[in-house]
Amino acid sequence: MGEIVARCASKAKLAAPDLAGASDEAVDAAIGEMAARLSSARAKILAANAEDVASAEAAGMSGGLLDRLRITEERLEDMAEQLRLLASVPHPARETPVRDLDGGLRLIELRRPVGVIGANYEARPNVTVDVASQLVKSRNAGVLRTGSAALRSAMALLNEVIAPGLSDANIDPDVIQLVPTPDRAAAGALVELPHLIPLVIVRGSGETTRELDRRAAAHGVRTLAHADGGGVLYYDVKADHSFAEDLITRSLDRLGVCNRLNLLLVHRDVYDAALPGIQAALDKAGVEPSLPPHDHAIGYEWALDSDREATVTIAPVDSLADALRVANEETSGLAAGIVTTDKKAADAFISGYTGTGVFWNAPTRLLDGFKLRGVPETGINLDRVPGPRGPVTFTDLVLRQFAVVPA
C-alpha cells in the first residue's frame, strides 16, 4: 500500500508546479469544464454509482449511509452548480503589501500553495469533486483516498470529470490522483509520507479517523481532521414552542450527516410542557427520542449507529449555564444552537459556547462550507488552535510567505 500511495503522490508532486503556475483564468476554466462534464458524463457516473449502491445494499449498509453514497440526478446538478459558483469566485491576491521597512525596503505577504495535499474521506462521492475542485482552486495537487463503498463512483468522477476538465484547460491532469484500491491500509500510508504529502485532510467519524490523526502526528504530517460530529440544540425557557418544533424537524432532514440534530437539551422549567410538541416534531422527521435515564453517553453520535441512527437524545437541564457545560464538555464541539426569543440568553449562549459553530434560532445543519461560505468545503476542522477552523475552503489551503524587496 505504501508503494501504491507513494506512486500517486510522486505523480501529483511532479505535476504540482504546472497547477501552481496556472493563471486564474485557466484554473477557473478547468473547474467550469468539470461542471460541464458532470452533465455530459451523467450516464457513466450514475451507472458507476448504481453499482456502488447495489454492493453497499447487499453488504447491509444502513439507510443513512446509503443516502450519503447515492448520487441522484438532482444531486448531480447540485454538484455542477457548486462548481460553476466556485469558478466564479474571485481569487485572493497572490501578494499583499504589508509595510515599508528601513533602508528603502518593503515587506510583502505572499500566498503559496502547500504543494501536495492528501484527503481521506468516507463513502460520499460528492466529496471527490468538492475536495478536488478546492485543491485546484487553491493551486494544490492532491492525492485522494475514499472508502471501498464509493470507489467506483470516485473513479468515474476522476476519469470522466476531473481529469478531462484539467486537460481541457491545459493543466496537467496528474495533479489530482485517486488511490486506486479499496484496501484500508492505504489510508494509513497516506499519512506517513511527509516528504511527499505534508498535509492531509482527514474526514470521517469515530476512532478510525482519530487514529489516522495520531499516526500522522507520529510521522510529522499535519492534518485538518474531522472525526466527530453531532449538533446540539438548547431549548430555552423562553423558546417559541411552534418555532422550536419546526426547527427540530428541519434539523433532521438528513440523518447520516455530522451536523444534524443529535442532542436536544431542554430547560427543566418547560421540559414537561414542551415534550409533546418535541415528540410530534420528531415523529414528523421519522426519528425516535432517547429519553432519561440514558444507557449511553449524552453526546453519543447517532449518525454513526447503523441500527439506531434515527434517534435524538433528549435531556433536561437546569439552566443555560448547564446546557453550555454539557455542550462544551460532553459533546464533540462541532456545533450548538439555542432556540429562544430572549436576546440576552442568546448572547450568553453565543459567548459561552466554545465549539466550531454556534447558532441562534437556526439549525446546526447550516455548518457547511457551501451553505455558510458559498463554496464547497474540504471538510470541517474542529481544532482548538489558531488556523483554519470550521468549514475549510480553498482560501484556507495556502501557506503564508514573507518577502522583503526594494521599495
Image: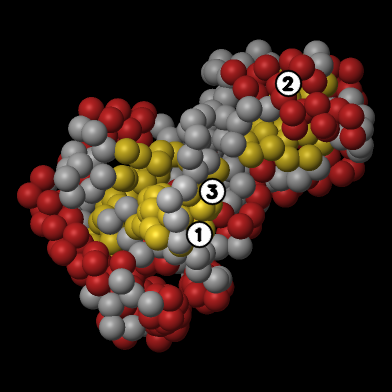
Relative side of 15 to 366, left or right = left
Q: Amino acid at mark 2?
A: Ala
Label 3: how many residues lie within 10 Å, few (<14), some (14-19) or many (20+)? many
Q: Amino acid at mark 1?
A: Thr
Q: Quadrant of residue 70?
A: bottom left
Image quarter where the C terminus lies is bottom left
Q: Nearer the viewer, residue 105 or 214?
A: 105
Q: Residue 356: x percent and y percent? A: 59, 36
Q: CA distance from mark 1 to mark 2?
A: 43 Å
The answer to whether the residue labelled 1 contacts the one labelled 2, judged by CB atoms less than 8 Å apart, is: no
Label 2: how many residues lie within 10 Å, few (<14), some (14-19) or many (20+)? many
Q: Nearer the viewer, residue 211 or 31?
A: 31
* Residue tagged 1: 96
The residue mark sitting in front, 1 or 2, is 1
Q: CA distance from mark 2 to mark 3?
A: 24 Å
Q: Quadrant of residue 239?
A: top right
Q: Residue 200: x percent and y percent? A: 31, 45
* Residue tagged 2: 323
Q: Residue at x 47, y 48 (%)?
A: 102
Q: Amino acid at mark 3?
A: Pro
Q: Is 363 situated above or below 163?
A: above
Q: Nearer the viewer, residue 205 or 171?
A: 171
| Element carrying mark 2 | helix
* Residue tagged 3: 391
